[in-house]
Image (cartoon, grey):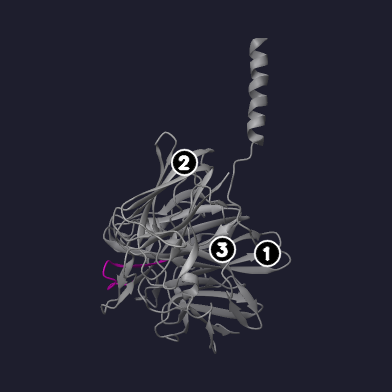
């Protein structure tokens, strides 16, 4: 009898536990670190998203903070573009060859081939000095499975010596490879080779190509060549892939450097009613790409033969059923720090605390499930190490936040993963370093100093 009662109790307890809702994020927030189901930072840069059987799959470069050497392609899944589950490192470092040790592997893009049913991934491979570009490809019979690297994509038995790339699948299932400088290659029926070239060298200087199609019109997005620096991305338009293509202008307001990002992909969200597109961009942070590089995902505005992102959406939510979106008011409560103390030299301004002294620390105690950090980004800003500890002093999070921007902007810099409700101490430490990069000709891009500017702390209860 006791066993029966105990069994009933455990069944009831399991039922009750299944009804307890686990707190989740409810909006796409650009420019901050995202966290997966394991509480780890989503690490999938220069990415693409493929919707398959109602699930979104995110593919992108797995980066470290050491250098730009290839470490693999990660895959995550989501039903809302907000909460991500880590699925698999779908393509790792190969024993040797184009994706072997000491190589670069970038801009992975995946399409499902209609004629074979297999998933084909394309990527740019190179040496560490970017002097040996190739287009590689890999295949898999499952979208989130282990992809097999097949080597180089060829056209008439010749290799394609290109670097920045993307893909586009037209409504009839035909696949296309897009590359820097404005090249369009039509893929063979099995996507494993190039069938023909539609457009050659149309956009000198154009990098990070992205394409979408809406109501019979094609749009082709590019960035300028500014190393890892963000710039004012622009686009072209045509009613045929073969052209003629017309240069239309900037994607975002001039001077906003595409809302601090570089183009990576355009995701179509299709419903029975309409189709909307999500611009996917990278906010690079060289050399700390693994921890400090983030994502800028924004709804695209399309109309009258033009596309744009006229206003920056700090937080927005997708309605997948209707292929629409709405802006979301933040549910982060600000000014909740019960105590704030500092170590080292911090300048107190009308906005908050500012320092460039390496090792200077600012700490605050906060209650809640998620801890938030607000600050100001400007051309003279650098890196900060952010650490969160629980009330027992156990470290629950350590990451790096990049405060740099070409233009001054204020906002959310960090929102922690969902944690057990409690009291936490967040510490911001100035690292005294900053994001910067150089072109092959030696031109410098990035910040010129290491300032960290903190304006507020917040929490979600």
Q: Nearer the viewer, residue 349 or 94?
A: 349
Q: Is residue 122 visible?
A: no
| Residue 237 left/right relative to 428 | right
Q: Position of residue 53 (x, y in %)?
A: 62, 55
407 over 357 or under it: above or below: below
User: Which corner quadrant of the image does residue 7 belong to?
Assistant: top right
Q: Nearer the viewer, residue 292 or 339?
A: 339
Callout 2–callout 1 Cβ contact below 8 Å: no
Q: Which residue is mark 3?
A: 314
- Dot 2: within a 10 Å radius of its alpha carbon, few (fewer than 14), some, or many (20 or more) residues? many
Single out the residue that lies furthest toward the top.
1
| Residue 2 left/right relative to 185 | right
Residues under labels 3 and 2: Cα distance? 25 Å
Q: Is residue 204 magenta?
A: no
Q: Residue shown at 66%/20% (left/top)?
A: 9
Local SS, label 3: loop
User: Which corner quadrant of the image does residue 305 belong to?
Assistant: bottom right
296 over 397 or under it: above or below: below
Q: Which residue is mark 2?
A: 424
| Chain-order first, disc 2 or disc 1 | 1
Which region shows up in magenta?
123-133
Q: Which residue is mark 1?
A: 323
325 over 300 or under it: above or below: above
Local SS, label 2: strand
Q: Position of residue 243 (x, y in %)?
A: 54, 87
Q: Residue shown at 50%/71% (left/top)?
A: 259
Q: Position of residue 279 (x, y in %)?
A: 55, 69
Local SS, label 1: loop
Q: Nearer the viewer, mark 2 or mark 1?
A: 2
Residues under labels 2 and 1: Cα distance? 38 Å
């Amino acid at each position: 009898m006791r066993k029966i009662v105990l069994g009933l109790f455990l069944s009831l307890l399991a039922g009750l536990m299944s009804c307890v809702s686990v707190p989740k994020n409810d909006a796409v927030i650009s420019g901050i670190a995202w966290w997966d189901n394991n509480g780890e930072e989503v690490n999938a840069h220069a990415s693409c998203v493929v919707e398959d059987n109602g699930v979104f799959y995110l593919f992108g470069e797995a980066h470290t903070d050491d250098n730009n050497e290839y470490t693999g392609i990660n895959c995550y899944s989501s039903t809302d573009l907000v909460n991500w589950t880590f699925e698999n490192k779908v393509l790792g470092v190969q024993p040797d060859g184009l994706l072997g040790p000491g190589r670069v592997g970038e801009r992975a893009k995946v399409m499902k081939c209609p004629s074979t049913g297999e998933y084909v991934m394309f990527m740019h491979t190179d040496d560490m000095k970017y002097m040996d570009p190739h287009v590689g490809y890999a295949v898999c019979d499952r979208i989130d499975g282990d992809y097999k690297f097949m080597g180089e994509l060829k056209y008439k038995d010749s290799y394609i010596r290109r670097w920045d790339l993307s893909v586009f699948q037209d409504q009839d299932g035909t696949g296309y490879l897009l590359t820097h400088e404005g090249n369009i290659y039509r893929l063979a029926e099995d996507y494993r080779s190039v069938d023909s070239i539609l457009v050659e060298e149309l956009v000198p200087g154009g990098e990070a190509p992205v394409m979408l199609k809406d109501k019979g019109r094609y749009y082709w997005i590019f960035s300028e060549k500014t190393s890892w620096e963000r710039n004012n991305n622009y686009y072209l338009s045509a009613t045929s892939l073969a052209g003629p293509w017309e240069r239309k202008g900037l994607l975002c307001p001039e001077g906003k450097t595409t809302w601090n990002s570089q183009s990576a992909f355009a995701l179509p969200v299709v419903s029975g009613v309409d189709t909307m597109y999500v611009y996917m961009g990278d906010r690079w942070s060289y050399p700390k790409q693994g921890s400090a590089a983030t994502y800028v995902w924004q709804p695209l505005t399309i109309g009258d033969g033009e596309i744009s992102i006229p206003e920056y959406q700090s937080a927005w939510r997708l309605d997948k059923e209707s292929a629409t979106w709405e802006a979301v008011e933040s549910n982060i409560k600000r000014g909740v720090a019960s105590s704030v103390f500092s170590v080292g030299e911090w300048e107190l301004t009308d906005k908050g605390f500012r320092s460039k002294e390496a090792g200077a620390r600012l700490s605050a105690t906060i209650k809640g499930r998620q801890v938030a950090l607000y600050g100001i980004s400007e051309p003279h800003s650098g890196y900060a190490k952010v650490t969160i500890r629980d009330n027992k002093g156990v470290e629950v999070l350590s990451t790096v936040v990049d405060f740099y921007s070409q233009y001054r902007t204020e906002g959310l810099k960090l929102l922690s993963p969902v944690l057990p409700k409690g009291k936490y101490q967040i510490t911001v430490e100035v690292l005294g370093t900053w994001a910067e990069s150089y072109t092959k000709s030696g031109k410098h891009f990035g910040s010129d100093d290491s300032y960290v500017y903190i304006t507020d702390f917040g929490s979600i209860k």
